[in-house]
Amino acid sequence: MLTRTTKVLIGKDVDWAAEVVDNAEILDIYDHIVNGEVIVFDKYKNVLAVGATINDSEVIYIGQATGVTYNVTNEAGTTVTGVRKIIFSDPIEGSKVKSYVGRAYAAKSEQVTTFTCTALVVTAGTELVLRLVYRDMQEQTGGGQFVHSYHYTTVTGETVDTAAAAIAALVNAHKGRRVTASVVAGTDALILTALPVPEGTTDVDDIDGFKMVEFDAYLNYIDANDYPQETLATKATVANSYGNGNWEQVRDLEKAVQGYRGFTNQTTFPIKKPATSTVEGAIYNIITIESDKSYVSSDNQYVKQAPLTTIIAIPVAALQTADILGRLNPWMASCPGAFAAIVF
């Protein structure tokens, strides 16, 4: 049997070539399209016309033009140069489309925890302890926790503001910190903001996937018996948000489906794989199409169906967005599911 197959097609901030018009044959546009064009094709792999429905073409394909070009010489000896390689989706059968969803770009945001220490009584010689317990460290096994603790002893004449600033300075001086600390003078507030995880947010070729720092924070003082006690500071936390369509997420999607194209080595050097289509720093709108594919398996003579997922990532405000949706929206609306148009 066939299991779910996913294809990810990633566009660039480009417009369709002038030759890519309704019903244009694929042989006439190969040497005109540019890297990063995402084109909707009909069942014959001609450009799908604006407004076409499943009555015009019961099957469509989505194609991503890549940066790879080659020369082709036909039987008559005519050579065409600059023919661009296209990555095609699996066939999308209109009668078997189950879902057509658009997700607009949403920015990621890091966790922020704020201690408001207005009620904190600062006494000279008191040891304050800021303890950060990290919950995103999957490497910690056996029920252990990854913790950073910062200790500060108050001095004569200390105020809440100066004590908070001293703790913030300790945090920011720590080379291994996973948060940054700040204070706003006069507010008695100590603000902790998670830092990006560098292993998955530096480059499109990062081995590690994208993840975000998550932590619990505790501000205590050490009593006369050497036990930690809660301070009178109040704590408020704004959780992180992974957002949607950030370049790190699109890169991870692209890496995850490379096995379907025969590229399974992600760690053993030298890594031989196609050029990455994701652009570092770009932001994307995402189109996801869920459908089934009919096929006849070797164990019987009746038609089975296998699930397919087609994901299209288009940079926000890319000119080709209107061309893509101008063809997908009417075609999807004509499917039995009568899917609503996607608008970004």
Image (cartoon, helix red, strand yellow):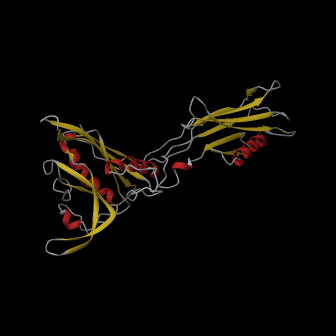
> Dividing the picture into quarters, in which one does residue 171 lie?
top right
Q: In which quarter of the image is the N terminus?
A: top left
Please report the residue visible at 37 percent of the width from the left and 60 percent of the height from the top. 12
On screen, residue 221 above or below 267: above
- Where residue 309 appears, as percent x and y from the top left, is 30, 43
Is residue 158 shown left or right of residue 311?
right
Please report the residue visible at 50 percent of the width from the left and 41 percent of the height from the top. 241
Is residue 1 shown left or right of residue 321?
left
Q: Nearer the viewer, residue 7 or 98?
A: 7
- Where residue 90 appears, as percent x and y from the top left, is 24, 49
Is residue 110 shown left or right of residue 303?
right
Please report the residue visible at 53 percent of the width from the left and 45 percent of the height from the top. 109
- Where residue 291 appears, as percent x and y from the top left, is 25, 41
Q: Which of 162 and 33 is in front in this view?
A: 33
On screen, residue 6 above or below 14: above
Q: Which of 141 and 246 is in front in this view?
A: 141
Q: Nearer the viewer, residue 179 or 7?
A: 7
